[in-house]
Image (tube, grey):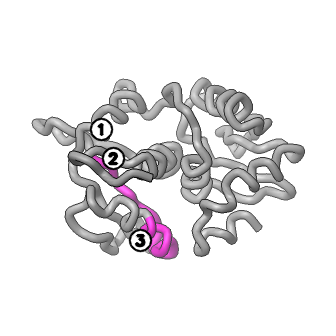
Amino acid sequence: MMDNTVGSLTQEQKSIIVGSLLGDGYLRIVPNRKNAFIEINHSISEKDYVDWKYLKLKDLVKSPPKQRKGKGRRIAYRFFTRQHPELTELYQKFYKDGKKIIPNLKLDPLMIAVWFMDDGSKSYKTYCLNTQRFDYQSQKILIQMLKEQCGINSSLNRDKEYFRIRVKQKSAEIFKKLIIDYIIPAMKYKLE
């Protein structure tokens, strides 16, 4: 893996950021500012995971993660990156009229692992990816990408009034083998 040159993102950083965008992360552009930044925000119970993301993205960040009181009793743990032109490029791909969509992507195992650590869970004998915030069309695109790029068959599974992606049981082992080496110790429980 190459180091940053002239402030550009490494492939590892891009994969972590895209995986985060598939999960809980979101990009923003502040009015009157040129470039986008990403916010990484999880529950304090996932402190180790936020710290891992921070260490991987540290050269893009001004200050380390901090606790913040959220809605109700929730305590969040989060950090923001600095604004960056490559994040603006991702913003232009991932957002249409302020709503997150799925652009054409080349998925890699680290992206999928981060997506799973953000928004995945074990479900009976397989895995689910909580994609409820994406519209139906975006979810169908993700299902197609998983199949064509990774050989993982999945379908939409109703979760109350929304849908999420459920890996088909016959693909569960393929999915697990693809991501297991990238799942950090604090998040291994999601595979069990």
Amino acid found under the numbered disc labelled 3: Asp
Q: How far apart are marks 1 and 2 (CA)?
A: 7 Å
Could you tell me which residue is drawn at 29 percent across and 58 percent down? Answer: 80
Residue position marked by numbered label 3 in the rendering:
51
Which quadrant does the C terminus fall into?
Answer: bottom right
Residue position marked by numbered label 2 in the rendering:
9
Foreground residue, 35 or 77? 35
The 10 Å Cα crowd at callout 1, few under 14, some 14 to 19, many 20 or more, is some
Residue position marked by numbered label 1 in the rendering:
86
Amino acid found under the numbered disc labelled 1: Glu
**What secondary structure is found at the residue carrying circle 2?**
loop
| Magenta-drawn stretch contains 50 | yes
**What secondary structure is found at the residue carrying circle 1?**
helix
Amino acid found under the numbered disc labelled 2: Leu
**What secondary structure is found at the residue carrying circle 3?**
helix
Closer to the chain start, of discs 1 and 2, is: 2
